[in-house]
Amino acid sequence: DGHGVPPFCPRYCPWVGSNHLLGVADEEGWLSLIDTAKPARDQPPGNRPGSWRAHHNAIFDFCFSPEEGKLVTASGDQTIRLWDISIAGAGSSAAGQRRAGTELLTCRGHTGSVKSVCARPNDRFVFASASRDGNVHIYDSRQGGSPAM
């Protein structure tokens, strides 16, 4: 949320026309979208294109989905979450109003902190995660929140 909490995994948005958005996660479970086309002084934590508590534990990694408007987070709470950020990243928020991602799916199956996540290129449904439990899981969002493999 930007209040002295160490940031993790900055990622630029790869979508055409949105590559000015920078996502930054932190160890308290917040995810923020920052518009790098605007000065930082115009985007304090409460006035960013998107900022929300995505998990109640550290977000160690996240990735933008090949499908525009979606991203996936990996957390110390042993879950992976799929988010719709199409509203969060669009335009600017009204004064004092935070834009948040909408949770679409919570994926479970790991027994340790989820340390990394990646989306399958050119596939809006499939992503993989790796955990401190020593396992790699593959999820297909069409099949729900359990590992497909």
Image (cartoon, rainbow, N blue to C red):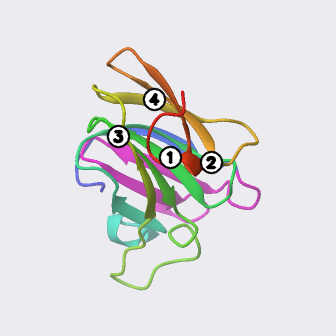
The residue carrying mark 4 is: 116
Q: Which badge, 3 or 2, is on the more N-terminal residue?
A: 2
Q: Nearer the viewer, mark 1 or mark 3?
A: 3
Whole-percent x and y of residue 33? 48, 58
- Residue 28 shown left or right of residue 98 in the figure: left
Query: Which comes before the other along the chain, label 1 or label 4?
Result: 1
The part of the chain drawn in magenta is: 15-40
Does 5 appear above or below 131? below
- Identify the disc placed on residue 65: 2
Q: Are marks 2 and 1 in contact (CB under 8 Å)?
A: yes
> Which residue matches tag 3?
79
Please state which amino acid type lies under the numbered disc 3.
Thr
Residue 148 located left or right of residue 98: right
Q: Of marks 2 and 4, which one's residue comes earlier in the chain?
A: 2
Q: Residue furthest top?
A: 134
Q: Secondary structure at mark 3?
A: loop
Residue 31 is covered by the magenta coloring: yes
What residue sits 59% from the left and 72% below the top? 90
Which residue corresponds to mark 1? 72
